[in-house]
Image (spheres, grey):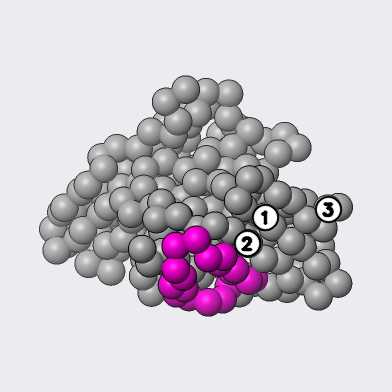
Amino acid sequence: DAGVIQSPRHEVTEMGQEVTLRCKLISGHNSLFWYRQTMMRGLELLIYFNNNVPIDDSGMPEDRFSAKMPNASFSTLKIQPSEPRDSAVYFCASRVSTATDTQYFGPGTRLTVL
Amino acid sequence: GENVEQHPSTLSVQEGDSAVIKCTYSDSASNYFPWYKQELGKGPQLIIDIRSNVGEKKDQRIAVTLNKTAKHFSLHITETQPEDSAVYFCAASSPSSASKIIFGSGTRLSIRP
């Protein structure tokens, strides 16, 4: 299995631009988590989905952030408009939503907003 | 909600010595405690986990202990090697949090040759 796939791996954009991060789950997994990692705040859970349904989005910073799961294997995290304080590494992780709680992380997208 | 505290934030040990990282959690209902290792430029990867019905678990050079009464859990790495250098995160999850995993702040472990 290829594991969780994220794209792009690096993104540099200017303030005010729209940014879309993408994530492909591991085949057979049905829970999807988006995290943000910064030096100051560590690993923060932004939102998670179970069977394509958003379960908890309390970690989404503000309305500029939105996440979708258009199908069972794919998710996007969109920031519009982006701001310099959004600069961070964004990870998605997937999990089989049964008795196990093990989350498998992707390699991350390093976002820099100038 | 759950709060996980992790110490120390940085740890440097001589190659071959042991390293210990400690965490505490606040939600007594937490029942799953994974440990993740994050190497530079990569996502966190699960290295070992323990559930609340077990007090200790070992996998080769890595062991985890859990004290439910004190709400403490620890990671022990013996015979450390250069490839153990990384950031380690503890985490906790409880049914009341809909199985969200709450991460500690991380420990940067450096192995001195």
**Mark drawn on residue A20:** none
Disc 2 is attached to a residue of which chain?
A: B
Region rendered in magenta = B6-23
Which one is in front, B63 or A102?
Answer: B63
Residue A67: % across, % down: 43, 45
Question: Alpha carbon of mark 3 to alpha carbon of mark 2: how far?
Answer: 16 Å
How far apart marks 1 and 2 lie (CA) works out to: 5 Å
From the top left corner, tell me how far across and down residue B30 is, in percent. 76, 60
Q: From the image, state whether disc 3 or disc 2 is nearer to you.
A: 2
Name the mark on residue B63. Answer: 1
Give the residue type at disc 3: Val
Amino acid on which disc 1 is placed: Ala
Q: Residue at x 36, y 63 (%)?
A: B113
Q: Does the magenta segment cover residue B15?
A: yes
SS state under label 2: strand
Horizontal and vertical percent for residue B39? Answer: 39, 52
For the residues bearing labels 1 and 2, Cβ distance under 8 angstroms: yes
* Residue A54 in view of the camera: no
Tell if the residue under mark 1 belongs to the same chain as the one under mark 2: yes
Question: For residue B54, which numbered disc appears in the image?
Answer: 3
